[in-house]
Amino acid sequence: MSAPIRVMLRRCLTESKKSIGKTYFRVKQNNDVHSDILNGYFCKRKFYGITVFKPNHLVASPVLQRGHISDKPTFTLSEITCIVNRSLSTLTGRNCWKCGRTQNGRSELFICECGIVQEVSDLTYFQVLDIEETFDVDLKALAFTYKELQKILHPDKYSQKTEKERDLAETQSSLVNKAYMTLTKPLSRALYLLELNNQPIEESNSDVDPDFLMEIMEINEELADVDCPEALLRIQTENNQRLEGCLVEISKAFKEKNIALAKEHVIKMTYFVNVDDKIKEIYRKSF
């Protein structure tokens, strides 16, 4: 890329980006987008508690015809993810809605000693799965707790119970699923921790380093020009290294309680995860 073009694109990125994660891609003379993966508008879907974007191949908009297209990766948890005030969360002082007895904290969080499914609310996903609130979770312990909870909360076990018990079992089973799917993935776990620390990443944020956006744009241009599996593998290897670097920095930042720095690296990680998704899409379509 020549120096004048680089300067022009840098200025465009600095002046025009209105939301976090927006990157611009050149369009070829014949109005074909410079990436067959990023074409037209984007539509949202829900996946593991976070909103992601998937391509929708529509007719090029006026923005495309002028030579640009915006690619916005995801940064926010979906509406179904409930972030609660941890100061209100408690495992004590709860009474069974059926027998009325005071429950014994964690051991009766979901099931009272009388065998009745309990109402669970105002708990973080970390509390639901009985793990420390940290980015560096023990995935084996997390999976073990998840499987054990699903054994006792599976709705089929309550098919002969009252309607309220069936509804509670279904609700709690769904809560455990959401908690597990959010915490088992590094990106969604990091986003959730930022939410808990009142530092959510929003699409309206605009403090992304223009140099970093240029780097992402160039990576996507490389992807657009890939013509063999070997070239794609090289890009994937480099991107995996970037992702690993982000994980190290995010872990360090959360340990040091530096939420602002953690947020900065989570933003970068989101872009690299977006690149990884595109690489996988190319593998499926082309090789």
Image (cartoon, rainbow, N blue to C red):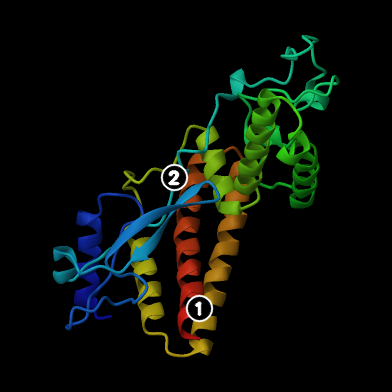
- Label 2 belongs to which residue? 76
Q: Say left or right for 174 vs 153.
A: left
- Residue at (25% x, 72% y) in the render: 6
Which mark is nearer the camera, 2 or 1? 1
In the rendered image, the vertical position of residue 247 relative to residue 10, given as above or below: above
Q: Say left or right for 144 vs 187.
A: right
Q: Provide the secondary structure element on which disc 1 rests.
A: helix
* The N terminus - image quarter: bottom left
In the rendered image, the vertical position of residue 84 relative to residue 52, given as above or below: above
Q: Give residue 7's position: percent from left, percent from top.
A: 22, 69
Q: Give residue 241's position: percent from left, percent from top.
A: 58, 69
Q: Give residue 286's position: percent from left, percent from top.
A: 46, 84
Q: Decide: marks 2, 1 in contact (CB < 8 A)?
A: no
Front residue of 156 and 83: 156
| Residue 194 visible from this viewpoint | yes
The kind of residue tagged 2 is Thr
- Label 1 belongs to which residue? 284
